[in-house]
Image: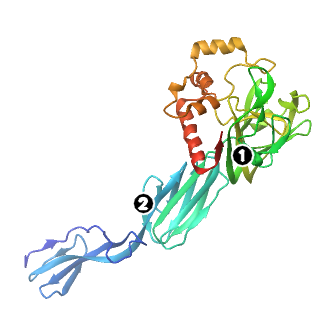
Amino acid sequence: MAGESITIAAAMPSYQDTESIDTTLYAYKLYNFSKWYVVDSGAHVVAELNPGDTYTPTSSVSIVPYYVEGSIYVNVAPGSLSNASYTATYSGGSGNSNSTFTVPKGTALSITFTFNESSNRSYTITASDGNNKSGSPSSATQTVSYTANSNLSIAASSEEGGTCFVRGTLVTLADGTKKKVEELLTSDLIRIFNHNTGQFEEGTIAAIVNHGYSYFNVMTLTFSDGTVLRFVEDHGLFDLDLNQYVSFTFDTCMDYVGHHFVKNDNLTNSILSVELVSVEKDIEYVESYSVFSSIHLNHVINDMLAISTGLTGFYNFYEYNSDLTYNLDSMNQDIEEYGLYTYSDWEEYISYEIFTAFNFENVKANVEKGVTTKEEIIRFILWFYELVETGSMWTN
């Protein structure tokens, strides 16, 4: 009222404007409160006031907020994410792949990607202004610098590396001849080891997987007789000192130097023992493959008895005798205690052919012992079907 002193109100909140910008490029423009204007009946500004000021009007006036143009903000939104996540940090804050956040246009982001799986790691930063960025990291984490000048969508993925070996590895066929893994057919008969009979025998192929080219953890194993094997990510050999299959990973591979492993004498089709004398580790851009024989799952590559140990729980079902046969007393005791799976336990997830080919029956002991879980096996099944659908796996 005229003649009465009034105390000016506190600051008004900022507001977001989407009317004056291209929202395909930006999220919004921010307007920030600056001061209060005292406006007379003729729309003239007669005073500028700050919050908390005292003002005594001499006539009828309006007191209105005045805003100044602030920053343009952009969205940083999660795109397609598969076995990967990211955290973005910037001056004054951070965001992550769980939700969309906004930053002022021109903000320098430091984006750290975390990849849960070991192969085909990739990220793509898609910008509305076309300034996209992508990469295929070789490690499980990768930090990328990026300046956000428009709306962003951030995608990342990685795939299960599986248990595999490099292109060019020789697979022994049932008749003793050898074939490069990349030339192998699901109709080929291959040499396998039967732990029921203790003999190298003829076996069929359940599946062949081409993991494609990517940056992989590669281990080069050299044995006492000059044999060389190149494993990718995770693969297994039969350790004669421990009397079981052991898994070679980047973390464990050096532990087995000096151990003795099963080699197939191609002339007599018998068991030989060779010592692992060295392991070299590197990250390489290679093509890799996996091979699963029906029921036994093992195979002979570069004359070494090997198995896909990435399928945790699908090997070392029971104790072995010195001749590599299952110890029947231990086997029967485990079966009596834990039982065997029947197809009805898995028919919701797999066909009977897969149940048989991958020896699901005997996996139950390892589940009950805590070596693996049913959830982990279901995860493998989903991975299996994904590979089939994408044409990366061939099955019999």
The answer to which of 198 and 35 lies nearer the viewer is 198
In the figure, residue 310 lies in which quadrant?
top right
Q: Which mark is residue 101?
A: 2
Secondary structure at numbered mark 1:
strand
Q: Is 127 left, or right, of 357 in this rendering?
A: left
Marks 2/1: CA–CA distance: 40 Å
The part of the image, by quadrant, that contains residue 305 is top right
Of the 4 image quadrants, the one containing the C terminus is top right
Q: Position of residue 324 (x, y in %)?
A: 78, 21
Residue identifier under label 1: 289
Between 62 and 148, the one nearer to me in the picture: 148
Up the image or down, 4 lies above or below 213; here it is below
Quadrant placement of the N terminus = bottom left
Residue type, numbered disc 1: Tyr
Q: Nearer the viewer, residue 209 or 141?
A: 209
- What residue is rendered at 62% in x and 29% in y? 356
Residue 86: x and y, percent? 53, 54
Above or below 306: residue 383: below
Nearer to the camera, 185 or 116: 185
Residue 203 visible in the current orientation: yes
| Rendered location of residue 98, percent (x, y) | 45, 52
Q: Is residue 259 visible?
A: no
Mark 2: which amino acid? Phe
Q: Residue at x 71, y 13 (%)?
A: 328
**Going by the image, does 26 lie left or right of 380?**
left
